[in-house]
Image (spheres, grey):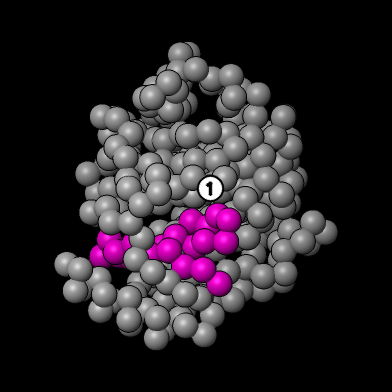
Amino acid sequence: MKAVAAFLLVLCHLAVSHAWTCSEAPSLSNIKQIDAGQGQVVARTSHNQAFFLIGSRWYYLGTNKLKHVTVGPAGLWGVDTSNKVNKYVAGKFLPSTGLTMQQVDAGGDGQVVGVTSSNKPYCLTSSRALSYRGTGSPSWTAFSGTLKYFSCGPLFGCWGTNSINNVYVKKKITATTCAMTGWQHVSGIAAKMIEVGTDGSVFAVTTTGKVYQRYGITSSRPQGSGWRLVPMCMAIQHLSYDLGTLWVVTTSGFTMRCTH
């Protein structure tokens, strides 16, 4: 396995050396989804087990079966295999009642956003996200439109993709109230998922497994001005970006961390 990993890294270095330097991430078998925020990294495996990275070791986060896990200013959250939203409290994930989700994101300015199995986007205010302790039903605010994947950053807004892989951006969400502006379509790629970093960087994975970065994002132009290909030697299924590091998971479960 180490020989295979070394060979893949050589190929990746040749593919991306002009822009990015990639190395093998700390080993964890069968990673399917990864999320990074505020210097923390979490991952979910094909067995629906959640792990937290400390140094070069992954630590198991409990027995709850999770299909999506996220970490950021709002804390550590996840969605279990029955679509219940979970928050990590006092060393374990505690499932909530009420609204169910298929994906959540804790990377905004303290708020949590997510989408239901019917692709409806929702927001949990920063005060409700912070105060939730694993009992009762959090009160979510509904947004217009439909999305299958939803991600926020604390600086320049939130991004999402819908069921036909169109990309949209919300220019502003107020974390304390979940008040928002309307969706704006962003053309150029067909994305199956998209992630926003804590510095406002936006990366997307296309339906063919290619990685693109949105450039030209500013406070006055949160939608940015174009897409830039980030060459990868293998097809990517999931990614996350935080503190200058791009974490990518290939369709074969190989995980790398790349720096620019």
Three-letter amino acid code at the position of disc 1: Gly
Residue 11 in view: yes
Question: Does the magenta portion include 248?
Answer: yes
Measured from the top left, where is residue 243 in percent x and y? Answer: 58, 56
Where's the C terminus, which quadrant? Answer: bottom right
Residue identifier under label 1: 39
Q: In this view, does 25 lie above or below 3?
A: above
Residue at 29 percent across and 64 percent down: it is: 254
Give the left or right position of residue 92, taking residue 191 as reference. left
Dot 1 crowding, Cα within 10 Å, few <14, some 14–19, many 20+: few
Residue at 35 percent across and 72 percent down: it is: 235
What secondary structure predominates along the stretch shown in magenta?
strand
Residue at 33 percent across and 56 percent down: it is: 26
Give the left or right position of residue 63, taking residue 156 as reference. left
Say which of 239 and 9 sits in front. Answer: 9
Where's the N terminus, which quadrant? Answer: bottom left
Question: What span is in magenta?
Answer: 240-260
Measured from the top left, where is residue 166 in percent x and y? Answer: 54, 62
Q: In this view, does 21 lie above or below 183?
A: below
Residue situated furthest top in the rendering: 136
Question: Does the magenta portion include 79?
Answer: no
The image quadrant of residue 47 is top left
